[in-house]
Each structure stands twice: as C-alpha cells, then as structure tokens.
Image (cartoon, rainbow, N blue to C red):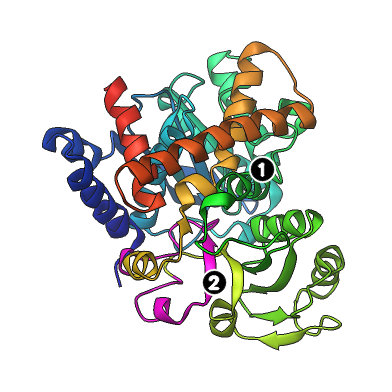
Amino acid sequence: MQNLFENAMAQLDKVAKLKNFEKEFIEALRHPDRDIRISIPVTLDDGSLKIFEGYRIEWNNALGPYKGGIRYHPLTDINEIKALAFLMMIKCAVTGIPMGGGKGGITVKPKNLSKGELERLSRGWVQKLVDNLGPYKDVPAPDVNTTPEIMSWMVDEYEKLTGEKSGACFTGKPLDRGGSEGRGPATGLGGYYVFHALRPHLAEDGLPQNCKVIVQGFGNVGSNVAEIFSAHGHIVMAVSDSKGGIYNENGLDIKKLIEYKKATGSLSGFEGAKDITNVELLETPCDLLIPAAFENVITEQNAPKLRAKAIMELANGPITPEADEILFKAGIPVIPDILANSGGVTVSYFEWDQNLKGEHWSEEEVNKKLKVILDDSSKKVYEKARELNTNLRNGAFILALERIKEKT
C-alpha cells in the first residue's frame, strides 16, 4: 500500500495532466521549501540531559506564511509529515486563505515527561527554530498530543526571544492568550457547512432531508461532526473508534454517547446499540459515510463493498487513489479532505488575523465568516469539477494549483 505522501504525489501528477500545468511548476511543488531537523537538549527533573529530535517542514509560501500543526509522537513518520505539509498548502489554497503549508513536531512520548520537562522541551523547539518562525514567516498550531497550553508556552518563548507581542506567531492558543472562539468544533462544523453547500449535487437520486450518517472515528473531530449532524436533524446510525463501533438503525443519542465514552473510555455497551467492527461499519448502507480517523482506510479491496450514497473525508487521506477511481466509476461522490476538513485551518487563519488586528471576534462572527468561505470554496470546487468532467478531489486540487500558480 502506498504511503500518504506517495498518494499525494500521485494526485498531483494526475491533476497536472488534467489541466496541463507547466512541468517546472509541478516539479517545484513536489519538494518542500525547507526540511528542518533539530536537536533539542532538555534537562530532565533528575538532572540528566536528554536530546530530542525535532523537525519542521515548510511547503510553498506563494500565498502567505507557512501554516500547520506541531505533533509530539514517538513514531513520527517523515513521509506522513511531508504529506500533511503538502496537503496543508493545497487546503489553504482551496479555501483561498493567504497561507502556505507546514508541519512539524518532536519525536517524543509526552506522557513520559513531567509538565516541567514538557514545557522545557516545547520552549527548546522554539529556541532552535525562532529564526524560521513568525507571523509573516511560519505560524504553527496544535496537532497530535499538543495543546493550547503548549502553544502558550511557545508564544511566551517566542516573545521573549524576539520582542514580538502580537501573539500571531502561533494559533490554537487559549482564549486568554489570544485564541479564537469556535476553534474546537471548527473542523466538524466546517465539514457540515461543506456538506450542506454541496448536498444538491451529491447523489443522482438525491439525499433525504434527514440523512442516515455513519462516522468512523470518535475523537475530537468525529464526535463533533456526529453531534453537529445529529443536532441538525440527521440520523447518526453508527460511530466507531480504534476499538470498534456501535450501531442503531434508528439513530444514536450522540450527546449521551459522548458522556458515556468519557465515563467508560469505550463505545461498547452503549444502551440501545449493538457492537460492530470497523469493517462492518464501513460497509453498512447509509446516505453519508464520514471517515474521520486514519488514512488509507478505504482501499481498492473494500471500496467495491461500500454502500454509501456519498462520502465526506474528515480524516487526512482516508481513501487511496485506487479506491477513489472505483468510487467515481460507481457514482459515489467523495467530498475530499482538502475541502471537507479545512474548517480547522480556516479558523486558525481567523485567529492569526484577529491577533494582527488586535481584535477578538465572537463565536457567532467566527462561524458566520467560516460559512461564507466554505460555501464559496464548495461552489468553486464543484464548478471546477463539472467544467473538467472530473471528481471533486481533482476539482479542488486544480482550483488550489491555479491559485498558487497565479501568485508564483
């Protein structure tokens, strides 16, 4: 199976042929501007010194400063990080926000560190990368195992080193440090806005007023989108996490389920629902399937077995290129990740914008601005796909590349 980076490069090559972009332009986009590796010395609580490996990948700033998360994980895969930086560049261009792509982090298991050690490590990452960071250079954000508190430590360190006080050097900060209202549910809410905008075009026989929805993944994004769809009258029949899923054809009470999982740590045993596997969940008939967990979960092996009328990707790269072709030929439209899950980076951009202007917008203002951008982006992606008689993913990629090319 191809890794996420190989999938992204295959997609780039495919759309380059569809639109006949210049070879030099496409070749340049296959490589990051910078692939930075750093060593971070940290004095542990017992007085010993440990060296951690950190990294930052910056991918094309034609539209604006690099933007992307920082992850703390012991099994960091450089191909995954490269792919996510590349896809962030595309995602920003799809939504038309003035930022490029970035991704970074530290090879570490944060649970093995005390709070003090974690803070020293986080500040060390900034110390080593300070010359590359800044509101108009590279604006990181939280990702896997990083939090608003970690962002506040990083902002504080950056301000100490540079004297820059806008707070716009990092996003995903706590509200009292210049964070944005509405950031938590932004990815799930953005997905709902995109779905609503594209709904009239999604299935030949149409989708019912109250869609039957299945969500794979019940972390922050998956639980949020399940709750949002449920609140808008849709029937969330099944959800799953890494351990397995649950199903009720009449719909699950998502608010109660969120509390149940907090209390028990599991979905299994939820009242009125039967346990199912992740394999069974993906192949259950529904109006809308939302993969919101891992990459490469829908492949050429299981794609022919899917019985969804439409699919919306909230995870990064959950469908392989081979499966994409199968679904397109089967008439199952896919709302691609680079559009569907762009609500998070859009609200991060709002935070950056607020910080630079010295403003603080209400959650209502944030959501209103988010809807305007995603409605417009969805319309343009659909029009581009229809113009070229291709799928929504290709339409989104081509829209992004045209915008980058215009500023290159």
Q: Which of these two is toward me, 211 or 42?
A: 211
Mark toward the start of the polypeptide (1 vs 2): 1
In the picture shown, does residue 234 fall above or below 383?
below
Distance, label 1 to label 2, CA atoms, is: 25 Å
> Callout 2: few (<14), some (14-19), or many (20+) C-alpha neighbours within 10 Å?
many
Left or right, residue 74 beside residue 24? right
Q: Quadrant of the N terminus?
A: bottom left
Does the magenta stretch mainly form a helix, a strand or a loop? loop
The answer to which image quadrant residue 23 occupies is top left
Left or right, residue 135 beside residue 231? left
In the picture shown, does residue 62 fall above or below 389?
above
The answer to which image quadrant residue 383 occupies is top left
> Residue 135: horizontal and vertical position, in percent?
51, 20
Residue under circle 2?
A: 308
Q: In this view of the protein, can residue 259 be seen by the observer?
A: yes
Q: In this view of the protein, can residue 86 be seen by the observer?
A: no
In the picture shown, does residue 294 fall above or below 39?
below
Q: Which mark is residue 365?
A: none
In magenta, the rendered stretch is 297-322
Q: Which of these two is toward me, 238 or 154?
A: 238
Q: Which mark is residue 186?
A: 1
| Of marks 1 and 2, the one in the foreground | 2
Residue sitting at x 63%, y 80%: 243
> Residue 295: horizontal and vertical position, in percent?
45, 64
Q: Is residue 103 magenta?
A: no
Q: Which of these two is toward me, 288 or 106?
A: 288
> Residue 202: horizontal and vertical position, in percent?
52, 56
Q: Amino acid at mark 2?
A: Ala
